[in-house]
Amino acid sequence: MELNDKVILITGASGGIGAATARQLAGKGMALALAGRDVGKLEMVADDCRKVGALAEAFPGEITEEAYTASLPDAVQTRFGALHALFNNAGVFETGSFETADMSRWDMALDVNFRSLLHLTKAAIPHLLEHPESAIINLSSIAGRMTFGGGGIYSATKHAVHAFSGCLFEDLRDKGLKVATIYPGFVDTGMTAGVQGERSHMIQPDDVARTVHFVLEFPANACPTEIVIRPQFPL
């Protein structure tokens, strides 16, 4: 995909990986539709993108509300005239033993990490398929390829993203729509604030942003469907 003037919708765009990706792609001339709950933070990211000459707009809302996800791609289309790519980045890091789990929190993690992704993707696909080259990039986790104690709901939702993404690629590959999934280890963001270890050894948000950029510019005849990112050094 030639990125200049193309439009990407990024969820969880108010900080961390989402904000880093917005800034990375703004520098390549993309127009940014920024989704998230915190209007103030979204506007700050949008301003950063505008400073390098990119078009950027905040679309604040609650990702778990179906009315919001159902209308969001239409709103982006109305504002920018097109939608070429979707980065499903929003997520929460909920862990703990199933035996003592607060099931309301597990339901929330399921809603944020997977159910909202399904609904937003469903709403976005008709817009994406209007273009000969388009892309959906889903953020899973290394936990979407393995399991660990206390990771029941987080790992389950990220495994679900993994399985859904693979099936979606098979369903739509002949229409030219790329579907790629990124599987990072621990990333140095607020979501991992409680993780012990040397934070400078963690993957940085810009590392994931560069990976999104890589997928978008990959040649049209092939698709990097799965990309695993691991910290080079132990935490």
Image (cartoon, rainbow, N blue to C red):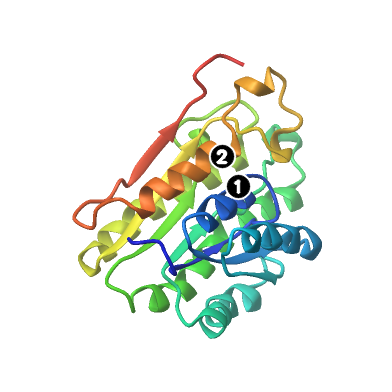
Image mark count? 2
Task: Give how far across and how far down residue 142 sits, in percent.
Answer: 49, 33
Task: Give how far across and how far down residue 138 sits, in percent.
Answer: 47, 52
Residue sitting at 70 percent across and 55 percent down? Answer: 14
Q: Give SS at disc 2.
A: helix
Residue sitting at 58 percent across and 55 percent down? Answer: 22
Residue sitting at 68 percent across and 23 percent down? Answer: 199
Using the image as rendered, state which of residue 57 and residue 197 is in the foreground. Answer: 57
Residue sitting at 18 percent across and 55 percent down? Answer: 221
Residue 162 makes an appearance in the image: no
Please give the residue where the numbered disc 1 appears in the rendered image.
20
Residue 186 makes an appearance in the image: yes
**Cβ atoms at labels 1 and 2 below 8 Å apart:** yes
Task: Give how far across and how far down residue 213 sits, in percent.
Answer: 43, 49
**Is 190 placed left or right of 77 in the picture?**
right
The circle on residue 206 is 2
Using the image as rendered, state which of residue 213 and residue 52 is in the foreground. Answer: 52
Task: Give how far across and how far down residue 215 sits, in percent.
Answer: 37, 49
| Mark 1 or mark 2, earlier in chain | 1
Q: Is residue 61 above or below residue 205?
A: below
Amino acid on which the number 1 mark rests in the picture: Ala
Quarter placement of the C terminus: top right
Amino acid on which the number 2 mark rests in the picture: Asp
**Is 153 placed left or right of 84 in the picture?**
right
**Is 164 placed left or right of 19 in the picture?**
left
Q: Quadrant of residue 4?
A: bottom left
Q: Give SS at disc 1.
A: helix
Using the image as rendered, state which of residue 53 and residue 212 is in the foreground. Answer: 53
